[in-house]
Image (cartoon, rainbow, N blue to C red):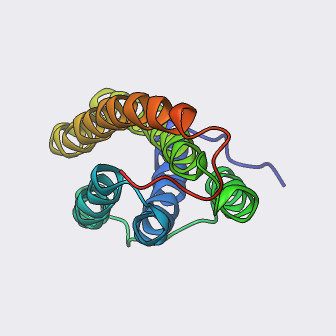
Amino acid sequence: MATKDKTLHDAFYETLKDVYYAEKQSVRALKKSAKAADHEELRQAFETHAEESANQVERLQQVFEIIGKSARAKTCEAMQGLTAEMEEDLEDFGDSPAADAVLAACAQAVEHYEIARYGTLKTWAAQLGYGDAAKLLDETLQEEKKTDQLLTQIAERINVEGAAAEGGSGRKSA
């Protein structure tokens, strides 16, 4: 029995399911990160992006509708690895002056993964003739890039503050 050749549409759908799972996990991770963050600006960035990510999940549901498929998540091994790394880092650095810098770095790892995936999905949607889906995916892509830039700016400030606190005990509040 011959197997059907996989198409770009198949790749798009599988990646969409993967990102749908990843985005739902991102909402949870951002809420947890916001609770763990000591630096006010970082905490606020996590809370704001958690709300954005919830909207991104809704956008993904719209993309599923556009392509005529039900919204289904497929376990995203990459996101599981990134969130496991965040958990480990929170445990290792939770009470240190470097905790917020480590949290910001973990969040940026997630953003970079999402930027790569949304960029791919946007391109594929356009190639497959899903113009409306491409627009929705681009909207999310731009939000992810903006969040990454914001996290970079915050991390640069946190890193300076954390370095100034070196040698002290416990976390430095901003």
When asked about the image quadrant of residue 57, the answer is: bottom left
x 40%, y 71%: residue: 31
Q: Is residue 8 above or below residue 87?
A: above
Q: Is residue 89 above or below residue 134?
A: below
Give the left or right position of residue 30, taking residue 66 as reference.
right
When asked about the image quadrant of residue 133, the answer is: top left
Residue at the limit of the structure toward the right, as seen here: 1
When asked about the image quadrant of residue 173, the answer is: bottom left
Give percent across and percent down for residue 95: 64, 62
Give percent across and percent down for residue 62: 22, 62
Q: Is residue 32 above or below residue 86?
A: below
Q: Quadrant of the N terminus?
A: bottom right
Give the left or right position of residue 165, taking residue 125 as reference.
right
x 51%, y 69%: residue: 73
Give percent across and percent down for residue 125: 32, 37
Q: How many marks?
A: 0
Q: Nearer the viewer, residue 100 or 161?
A: 161
Give percent across and percent down for residue 79: 61, 55
Residue at the limit of the structure toward the front, as seen here: 168
x 23%, y 59%: residue: 48
Q: Nearer the viewer, residue 128 or 32?
A: 32
Give the left or right position of residue 49, taking residue 71 as reference.
left
